[in-house]
Image (cartoon, helix red, strand yellow):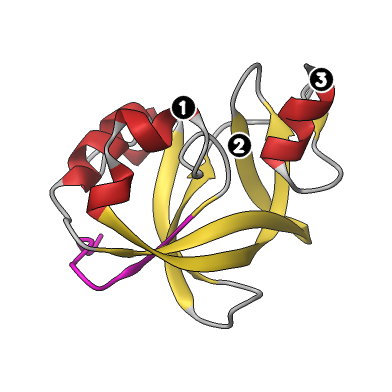
Amino acid sequence: MSAVKAGDAFAVYGLLRKGASGFAQFGLERAFRPLGPCRIPGLIYDLGGYPGLVGGEGAVIGELFEVADPSVIARLDAFEDYYPQAPDRSRYLRRQITLLTPARKAWVYLWNLPVTGFARVESGDWLEWVASKA
């Protein structure tokens, strides 16, 4: 698996979005430069207070960033329970995929476990979903 480099695009859809808890926790306002909204192919599920993105026919609302400080990635991988040397033990996998909009490649965390029994976030927008449940 290749490493995330400065200048790479990184798409987030849940707790790492601006205004969500992980964004501030990891200092992403310094580590990432905002590029604007994006749409990520797939479906998201509410896994009990955090979302998981899986493949499928759908669009997930996200935010696109340019990586300014790649040293933050190891901390994000740990937060997401992604172990590059042990994908079978990982809850999420970090992969480079092609976004729906803008049409470009970006790193994203994909859920690596079954979603059976979890609610699908029909709108594809995690922050809207959380606000509607508050």
Q: Is residue 35 above or below residue 84?
A: below
Residue 12: within the magenta? no
> In the rendered structure, which amino acid carries the disc numbered 3?
Lys
Residue 28 image-quadrant placement = top left
Q: Earlier in the sequence, mark 1 or mark 2?
A: 1
- Position of 96 with respect to 129 (left or right) is left
> In the rendered structure, which amino acid carries the disc numbered 1?
Ser
Residue 92 visible in this rendered orientation of the protein: yes
Q: Nearer the viewer, residue 30 or 89?
A: 30
Residue 21 is labelled as 1
Q: Nearer the viewer, residue 92 or 37?
A: 37
Q: Residue at x 59, y 26 (%)?
A: 50
Q: Earlier in the sequence, mark 1 or mark 3?
A: 1
In 3D space, how far apart are the residues under numbered discs 1 and 3 (Cα atoms)? 16 Å
Circle 3 sits in a helix, a strand or a loop, which is it? helix
Tell me where the magenta segment starts and ends, as one range.
1-11
- Position of 80 with respect to 6 (left or right) is right
Residue 52 is labelled as 2
Circle 1 sits in a helix, a strand or a loop, which is it? helix
Q: Residue at x 78, y 16 (%)?
A: 134
Residue 2: within the magenta? yes
Quadrant in which the N terminus is drawn: bottom left
Q: Which label lies toward us, 1 or 2?
A: 1
The residue pinned by badge 3 equals: 133
**Label 2, residues with CA under 10 Å away: few <14, some 14-19, many ≥20:** many
In 3D space, how far apart are the residues under numbered discs 1 and 2 (Cα atoms)? 16 Å
Residue 81 visible in this rendered orientation of the protein: no
Q: Where does the image place residue 57, in percent across and percent down from the top left?
A: 80, 61
Q: Is residue 130 above or below residue 63?
A: above
Q: Where does the image place residue 63, in percent across and percent down from the top left?
A: 54, 57
Q: Is residue 97 above or below residue 19?
A: below
Q: Where does the image place residue 94, in percent across and percent down from the top left?
A: 39, 50
